[in-house]
Image (cartoon, grey):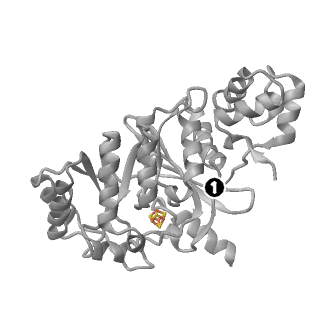
Amino acid sequence: MKTFIYDLTMERLREWVKEQGEPVFRAGQIFDWLYVKRVGAFEEMTNLPKSLRQKLEESFQFVILKEITRQVSSDGTVKLLLGLHDDHAIETVIMRHNYGNSVCVTTQVGCRIGCTFCASTLGGLKRNLTAGEIVAQVLEAQRLLDKEQERVSSIVVMGTGEPFENYDALMDFLRITIHEKGLHIGQRHITVSTSGIVPSIYRFADEQTQINLAISIHAPNDELRSKLMPVNRRYPFAEVLKALQYYYQTTGRRITFEYALIGGVNDRPEHAQELAEVLNGLDILCHVNLIPVNYVPERNYVRTSRDDIFAFLNVLQHNHINATIRREQGGDIAAACGQLRAKHMESTAR
Ligand code: SF4
């Protein structure tokens, strides 16, 4: 199978262009066609010599994402189920904010992390996406936004999959995304979320980017976290916190702690108190994002009541922890991560 053209960072494309005996500036022209003019065929790259267009054709292919389902929420959130060349399907979400449009991208087909509140992990991990398949999701979102003369202004790597288990593709995706001749999204407008893959947190810290890091913490201690997130047995709570401290010391960047509130499981005031003590003990700049989980039929998890959500928030704030409740988006569509794909898998299996 030919490599996807969107897999290539500017660096790799420059090398390839040189190997073809062409001047390096051609790489910039190709990026321009791919990410600014956003053409879908090499023959449309009319300022390139015909011979180079032919070589591109012979060496690379475009990622074709086939729209299987599109759901549009009353708040403007768009959830796409997109088909890949090998018949797998992935989810990509466009969210509307008053500060712009963000796209939530998927990095793996399925996920092996096994968080108990997540539909994406139910069928396990099928495969990693390539960098180009992640890039193509942003382009797909941009194509939809083009119709409204809007643009993708931020990216969250929080869709299906653990991005740090697909590290090299993730980094290439980020390089293409931030490149001034690529998608040109500001680094501070991109957030990568991890379940706590410790070695990759260190690696990511050493990359010294300005990209935001979010950690799915979901519990204030080892015991509860292991119940909710089996990955905690591989990378225990204390190790994760140590890695985050290193990240903060190395980059000086604020870290977001994602905390999914599950009724009666991790949403009691004593959990909030314990979490506040843990975070205050870290001496890092952080922010807690509280996310009320949707009903998870497979686990019988229920939603935390509105009063309990605010009680949890109050305890954190009382302890001087910067915290907010995530604005819910797409509540009237199957918005929770993996639900659309899970339904699709069910129907295709029948
Ligand atoms: S929440 Fe993220 S890391 Fe956890 S199982 Fe779901 S997709 Fe994987």
Q: Amino acid at mark 1?
A: Leu
In front here: 307 or 239?
239
Q: In the image, is residue 135 above or below residue 330?
A: above
Rendered location of residue 2, percent (x, y): 81, 48
Q: Nearer the viewer, residue 317 or 298?
A: 317
Instruction: Please give the name of the residue rendered at 26% of the width and 49% of the height, measured from the top-left corner.
Output: 287
Please indicate whether residue 15 sits to the left or right of residue 191 in the image: right
Q: Secondary structure at mark 1?
A: loop
Quarter of the picture holding the C terminus: bottom right
Residue at position x 65%, y 61% in the image: 89
| Residue depicted at 24% across the width and 76% down the height | 264
Task: Choose between 68 and 106: the one closer to the eye.
Answer: 106
> Looking at the image, which is closer to me, 259 or 148?
259
| Residue at image coords 64%, 44% | 136
Tell me, yes or no, if residue 17 can be seen here: yes
Q: Position of residue 302 (x, y in %)?
A: 33, 74
Q: Residue furthest left?
A: 318
Q: Quadrant of residue 191?
A: top left
Question: Does the numbered disc 1 mark a residue whose Cβ is under 8 Å from ligand 1?
Answer: no
Tell me if 191 is positioned left or right of 128 in this view. left
How far across and how far down the image is residue 267, in percent?
23, 69
Badge 1 local density, few (<14 within 10 Å), some, or many (20+)? some
Q: Is residue 346 above or below residue 246?
A: below
Q: Which residue is mark 1?
A: 129
Q: Quadrant of residue 58?
A: top right
Q: Is residue 108 left or right of residue 1?
A: left
